[in-house]
Image (cartoon, rainbow, N blue to C red):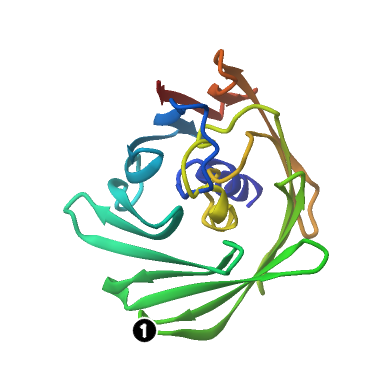
Amino acid sequence: MKKALQLLLVSLFFLTFVSCSSDSDADNPVLLKKLTALTMGQNATHTFSYNGTKLTKVSFEIEAQTDGIGYDKYVYNGDLITEIKRFNASNQNTTTTQFTYNANNQLTEVVKLQPANNYGFKNVFTYNIDGSVLVTGFIGDTNSQTNLSDITEKFYFQNGEVSQRDYSSTTLSFSVAYAYDNAHHPMHNVTGINAIKLYSFIANGLFGMQHNMTQQTTTISGNAATQVTLQADYNSSNYPVALYSDNGEYQYQFVYIK
């Protein structure tokens, strides 16, 4: 169970992509072109396409995963991502994820639809006075999602980053603490990423943070804490070109456009 959860919470962090407010490097921003990953024996490759600093498409090949070959297409309204459509290798739209924001450009609702199964899942985000964010799930079909899920999550922040995530369901409860470096994140200049970073955590996608995760400590209810530590190699612009764990189970390489 511990190893499976560790795989879920670390490896898949790198396999889902979402977007944020642009903070470009002068007139020629650094943009991520390709990510290759080896995660506990599973290989994956993601290739990124842009219009300026806005994502248009992310193609992926994920080993030993159902519909592991395909691509995601991104739709914007201004500088905010409003929709991600996933297509399989046969160009069939398998999943559509829709994003809604409030007047402060904070994520308030994410709806994920799977038309082939007539399935829909909705996350509702509540912003608390203490700065934490509560995320509540609802299940339904592609038309409406009104049945309360047994899953709730709560996020805590420090210096603009998610410092802790608490997960609770009828079958599993755990807490995850995160630590980061001071370097640029590979998606630092991508428009819209930061606005949906909470969704990226829920969807097990690392992208959406300002910096790079260096340590993750997971505590499952009734069990001892487990820890994963990552080290990075950086280029002259202070972006990671490689990220890896000491035991070799997690290895990531980044190639940039510039």
- Which residue is at a point 33% across and 39% down the rendered structure image? 50
Residue drawn at x 38%, y 82% is: 141
Question: Looking at the image, how many numbered discs can be counted on the residues?
Answer: 1
Residue 107 lies, with reference to residue 253, above or below; the image says below
- Give the residue displayed 35% in from the left and 65% down from the top: 96
Rendered location of residue 207, percent (x, y): 53, 43
Quarter of the rendering containing residue 84: bottom left
Query: In the rendered image of this protein, does residue 254 appear above or below residue 172?
Result: above
Spot occupied by residue 13 in the image (x, y as percentages of width and height): 54, 44
- Name the amino acid type tagged 1: Asn
Please report the residue visible at 40 percent of the width from the left and 64 percent of the height from the top. 97
User: Mark 1 falls on what kind of element?
Assistant: loop
Residue underneath mark 1: 143
Residue 86 visible to an observer of this rendering: yes
Tell whether 64 sits left or right of 130.
left
The quadrant where residue 184 appears: top right
Between 144 and 89, the one lying in front of the other is: 144
